[in-house]
Image (tube, coloured by chain):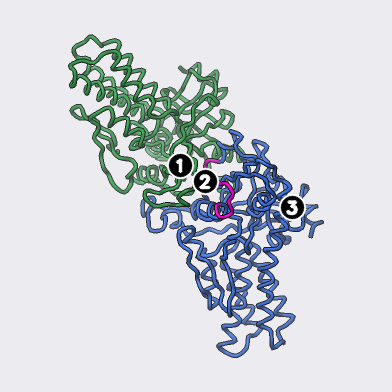
Chain colours: A blue, B green
Amino acid sequence: MIDHIYWKEGVLYLLDQRQLPFRKEYVECRSLNDVTGAIKKMIVRGAPLIGIVAAYGVVVGAREIIQRKGHCSDADIQNISRKLLITRPTAVNLAWALKRMQDAYNLHKDDPDMLNILTREAISIHVEDVEGNRILGAYGSDLIDDGDTILTHCNAGALATGGYGTALGVIRAAHEKGKRIKVIATETRPYFQGARLTVFELHEAGIEVELIPDNHVGLLCARRGIDKVIVGADRIARNGDTANKIGTFMIALCAHKYHIPFYVAAPQSTFDRAIDNGDLIEIEERDGKEVKYLRKTLLTLEDVKARYYSFDVTPAKYISAIITERGIIDKPFKKNIQRLF
Amino acid sequence: MIDHIYWKEGVLYLLDQRQLPFRKEYVECRSLNDVTGAIKKMIVRGAPLIGIVAAYGVVVGAREIIQRKGHCSDADIQNISRKLLITRPTAVNLAWALKRMQDAYNLHKDDPDMLNILTREAISIHVEDVEGNRILGAYGSDLIDDGDTILTHCNAGALATGGYGTALGVIRAAHEKGKRIKVIATETRPYFQGARLTVFELHEAGIEVELIPDNHVGLLCARRGIDKVIVGADRIARNGDTANKIGTFMIALCAHKYHIPFYVAAPQSTFDRAIDNGDLIEIEERDGKEVKYLRKTLLTLEDVKARYYSFDVTPAKYISAIITERGIIDKPFKKNIQRLF
């Protein structure tokens, strides 16, 4: 497994995912600014991982304040939480993890051991995510047949989570059960999560993988070259509408047309029970420069406008089932999501 | 207008489209190998342009043989034609142009002026393409409303044709009529025809353009950010099924879902009346390395497999109308295509 996030003596170490698979460089987060910067700049990405990093971020931030002025107030914790919350708008795991940290603080704020308790809470969020992914993977692996060719988009693997993966967790679990699987990974423009991260993870795990540009999915579906689709999620509404990496919706449309099962794999922390449907999910817009440049290489005219949305919403209608650590959610989603939690 | 192909004293000059928009370098084609290489290596691309280049290629090849052995036989011409035909399999304009050159040769093979006659035929194919595009553009511009935001994929512009464009010809014509248009150009992985060529052409023409990754189309359609889609074509079957740049089909699915008109713009030479439907169109597969590398920059693991299909087929069902230099073809396509030609 890739050691892409670890905590040591009050410092959070994050593998810089922008450099993968070419260089393994760690970023040390010693201040709240280091942590918020790591999320904003996409040194780390992936909804569950962002939540975990934010949880550690609360500890880093509280520790920084205690070192400076001897104690940390309610207002300080709220301020830390707010700065972490606004780093990225779409993944709801961020709010979920911050809520858990806030609850832990509220319960133990008068305890002289408060900082250690917060640290243990962040570690719990991290460890539970990995354990949850393993269970989710085991449930999901029942949906996979020996010999399947599975399409995945972006990276919903160990690198997007605490360390096992959601969509790739299902694939890992099926592989561990001895099912022969071939994965088709979309490269995932513009950040190339598929080309850089998914390919890397699957290669390390010894699972056969083939890379395609995002625009190839229609042809492969038409040629019956894909048996199943599994993707992760950044936020799931009460009715099952799912925000995930930009391009997911187009893949779902293709799968739907050819009756190819389309699965979403996500932990409980990705469900936003406060919203009825996907229209209410805020879609992050990032700097168009990330589309125009590949690292330092300009891909187009310098002064052309470019647009970069990070996510889109796949309506529940196009999703066959949602795989969670509590079991597989079938349709009708609204009723079954409510029942599960 | 961009002078991207010209003929001078027996030499064919081609602007190297792989270098655009960063460098304007011309490749000189003095031998048949130069011409076949230019098509295979995608120094030139775009179905109508490939046909024009192949027509000039027949002249270059015949001239080469006459210079070497004093005359050019039926077998020589067939051999030249065959070598040009196999450069790329999907665009039917290539076979169409070679057929015209073969017919010209058959009629005039005993004429001492045969080489000049072939040269004039190639120039005619070139000039007629530009004229045809202007007429096509005028027809198509009637479909465009003032204020439209139009999505296009790949490059079906001056650079893909003799010098005006099919899909971009419609946009140019509407712009020339004073209609205010905004174009959204997909970057078009992996060759970046959209980012490099379409953006460049529209920018030169003073038409507003915005660049998006290919995977953004679903979200933009869902948000009602696109009024119309216009694309080119590489081959159109008798029933209207259309092969075009990979990714076109996924865009058509999105447009269909949101009732956005989806137009194909193509000259007569793109219609293949020998085939009933799109299932019979051969789809070119190119080297996966073109997906794995951006110029010399590796985007993924060196030893991962990658797949690169150049085209996909959009079923006629998803096409609203086909714009040609003979007029606009409405549904039912099979009957109306037959009637038009």
The segment highlighted magenta reads A203-216
Dot 2 lies on which element?
Answer: strand
Is disc 1 surrounded by few (<14), some (14 to 19) or many (20+) residues within 10 Å? some
B180 over A160 or under it: above or below: above
Amino acid carrying mark 1 in the image: Gly
Identify the subunit bearing mark 1.
B
Left or right of A24: which side holds B38?
left
Q: Are marks 1 and 2 in contact (CB under 8 Å)?
A: yes
- Residue A263 counted in the magenta span: no
* Disc 1/disc 2 C-alpha distance (Å): 9 Å
**Residue under numbered circle 2:** A211
The residue wearing badge 3 is: A139
The residue depicted at 49 percent of the width and 27 percent of the height is: B282
Residue type pointed to by label 3: Tyr
Say which residue label 1 marks. Answer: B288
Residue A10 in which image quadrant = bottom right
